[in-house]
Image: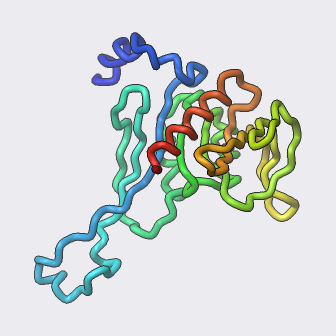
Amino acid sequence: MLTAWLGPLVEQQPWYPLASFATDVLALDETTLDPVARKLPILRSVKKGALALLPGKLAGLYDVRLQLWRRIDYVPETLQNCKVHARVMLAGLVKGTFLLFDLGYFSFEWLDHLSEHQYWCVCRLREKTSYSVLHTYYTCEEVFDGLVWLGNYHAQAGQPERSLKMLVLCCMEAIISSCQGQEGCAPMMVRAVKSAARESR
């Protein structure tokens, strides 16, 4: 109900056309909950910093346009890899949703899954990931925009992805996205990287 009420107001904002090719723009992430205090008798014998004091994690989908949480799931397994619950978080998302996530979610299988279900995505490229360049849209000094095939003969993605590299604040960033051949996608990725770089300072 809140989303339906805010939708028309959001569309009037000057920044709304950003990533206009996407039906929604959502950020996906997980966070580990803080350790519980050892005040109960059952916990007093547990050593400080023990895994037993960690109550689990929260996985969330944040609507970037509406600036609201779309979904928050409780994950009881503290050490579970974030990719395990990631597909559950996609339930109910419409085709054309633009997903933003970080390196913890990076895997060939995950990127292929998003492409097969017609989701857009943007994330950093894991260091030392091999790839073959299929087509170059633009290249100049530290900037590269092209279509690549991730992996090698040992492990390879199921389909090509769009790659963008640039030099931001003296740090090379590489972006992989499933928005193949889409105008306006590369500028969106540039702004995303610059924003992330500013926040990390």
Residue drawn at point x = 67 percent, y = 51 percent: 125
State the residue in front, 117 or 13.
13
Q: In the picture shown, does residue 10 fall above or below 29?
A: above
The answer to which image quadrant residue 5 occupies is top left
Q: Position of residue 38 (x, y in %)?
A: 16, 78
Q: Position of residue 200 (x, y in %)?
A: 47, 50
Q: In the picture shown, does residue 104 fall above or below 148?
A: below
Q: In the picture shown, does residue 109 fall above or below 175?
A: below
The answer to which image quadrant residue 56 occupies is bottom left
Going by the image, does 179 lie left or right of 61?
A: right
Colour basis: rainbow
Going by the image, does 65 lie left or right of 197?
A: left
Q: Position of residue 24 (x, y in %)?
A: 50, 27
Q: In the picture shown, does residue 125 fall above or below 161?
A: below
State the residue in front, 163 or 37.
163
Residue drawn at point x = 87 percent, y = 61 percent: 153
Going by the image, does 89 lie left or right of 58?
A: right
Q: Position of residue 144 (x, y in %)?
A: 77, 39
Residue drawn at point x = 61 percent, y = 43 percent: 168
Question: Residue farthest to the front?
Answer: 170
Question: Residue farthest to the bottom?
Answer: 45
The N terminus sits in image quarter: top left
